[in-house]
Image (cartoon, helix red, strand yellow):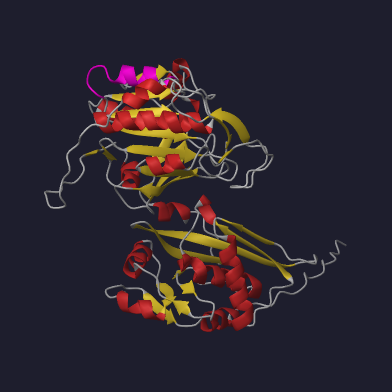
Amino acid sequence: MAKNTLSFVCQNCGAAYNRWQGKCESCGEWNTLAEEDVSGNASVPLSVRAKRKGRLFNLESLTGESRDAPRIISGMSELDRVTGGGFVRGSVILLGGDPGIGKSTLLTQAASMLAKAKHRAVYISGEEAVAQVRLRAERLGLATAPVQLASETSVEDIIATLSEGTPPRLVIIDSIQTMWTDTVESAPGTVTQVRASAQALIRFAKKSGTALILVGHVTKDGQIAGPRVVEHMVDAVLSFEGEGSQQFRILRAVKNRFGPTDEIGVFEMTGLGLREVTNPSELFLSERDLGTPGTAVFAGVEGTRPVLVELQALVAPTSLGTPRRAVVGWDPSRLSMVLAVLEAHCGIKLSGHDVYLNVAGGLRIQEPAADLAAAAALVSSLANAPLPVDAVYFGEISLSGAVRPVAQTSARLKEATKLGFARAILPESSSADSSGTTLALHPSSSLVGVVSEIAARGKRRGPAPPPQNRDDG
């Protein structure tokens, strides 16, 4: 019998060590090492492995007919947008998100729509019983959809069941951390089991042409739990984001071999499940604070979709030795850079002020084109100068204080025109790509000009007037 190879594997990043230690040197986490059998050959004797020979396969040339991968339309336009036009047959998607964000609700709705379209859809839950999945479907009004349900965690049993009859069009595994396989002797949920279970399910999907969706848990810092190698094994990695206090949910493509990697889909959580938002800009701007200092509308682009969102800033004097910097929905290091440029090139002293920046609606902005809108909101709050309610801002700020051009200027301006905006503050070199727009353009080559224009409209903050004594006699 082959001797099992024991090792200590980090349950956070998948790094392996020969002996136990308190801290993982790869990811820096403490108390995450667990003893596992990493041989992966516990069920195959050494004599059989030694006699096994490789099989021959055909080699093809680079020349030949290339066809687009056939896709299965899910029926949810926002989900199809993120996946690149639908589920590719034989593809594997890893879906991650915080607990309670709505992953199971989204997949239940997608499976129900595919089943109603006469496709075989299978939902396998390793965390809930079949009765619990049925209760969710009844709450969503999808109890009549012909979705096949099962509560199972054995990978071998799942593959054997799915191989009977016509291969399914869609298989949902909720979640991959609950699956286990006989090929390894580690406990379910460990890195070795997650890797081996995912590999077996992916092999089945590639052979049968079934679109497979694996649900993955996330760690406290938002990363999908388990080894990073699982993300490299799958074809697409989707992240379901959102704040618990917000009803908006963002489905973002982190990796996609069959479509764009920066596309987003917007959903709204309602009592009847997730509702698709076809115009996210109008939704994010529905509760704007018109005429309030410290608010600026940013014309951004997420994937192929232009999105207008409000940036809210608050600059207040601080009594602390170290001023506070808090940001929600944007990169904190990007905020620090904008503050440094404002102080170095524009003469804006913020060392004695607390700075708070928030992206309204729960959206997370990643592109640097939001620099100009963030700077305008910060100066507006400091100078108590309300920005024009019909203006949008976009542009990247360099360390020299110059406003650099950004991509897809025409798409940003077109979206702003559709929502009723009248002017745009944009980089000077980007104005050449704005032909055909009806907006009043205000090109800027330097941040100093934008700041001086905002500061000129400022209102001096004074102390509150004393209360008036009323004489009732």
Q: Is residue 136 above or below residue 454?
A: above
Q: Nearer the viewer, residue 191 or 222?
A: 191
The quadrant holding residue 140 is: top left
| Between 94 and 298, the one nearer to me in the picture | 94
Is residue 465 left or right of 152 when viewed as pictured? right
**Chain part drawn in magenta:** 154-167
Q: Position of residue 270 (x, y in %)?
A: 46, 36
Residue drawn at (36%, 68%) of the image? 407
- Nearest the viewer among 397 and 137 is 397
Q: How many marks?
A: 0
Q: Would residue 29 be seen by someone viewing this image from the given angle?
A: yes
Is residue 339 magenta-colored?
A: no
| Rendered residue at 56%/65% (across/down) | 334
Evaluate whether residue 346 shows in this view.
no
Q: Quadrant of residue 395?
A: bottom left
Give the answer, above or below, for where 18 lies relative to 200: below
Image position of 249 with respect to 38: above or below: below
Q: Position of residue 28 (x, y in %)?
A: 64, 47
Based on the picture, tell me whether residue 166 belongs to the magenta stretch. yes
Residue 173 screen position, x and y as percent:
41, 28
Percent of width and height locating residue 336 = 61, 68
Q: Is residue 225 left or right of residue 315?
A: left
Q: Where's the C terminus, which quadrant?
A: bottom right
Of 108 and 189, which appears nearest the observer? 189
Position of 254 compared to 170: left or right? right
For the point 52% across and 50% down, the residue is 362
**Residue at figure coordinates x 53%, y 63% from the top left:** 290
Q: Residue 268, located in which quarter of the rendered image?
A: top left
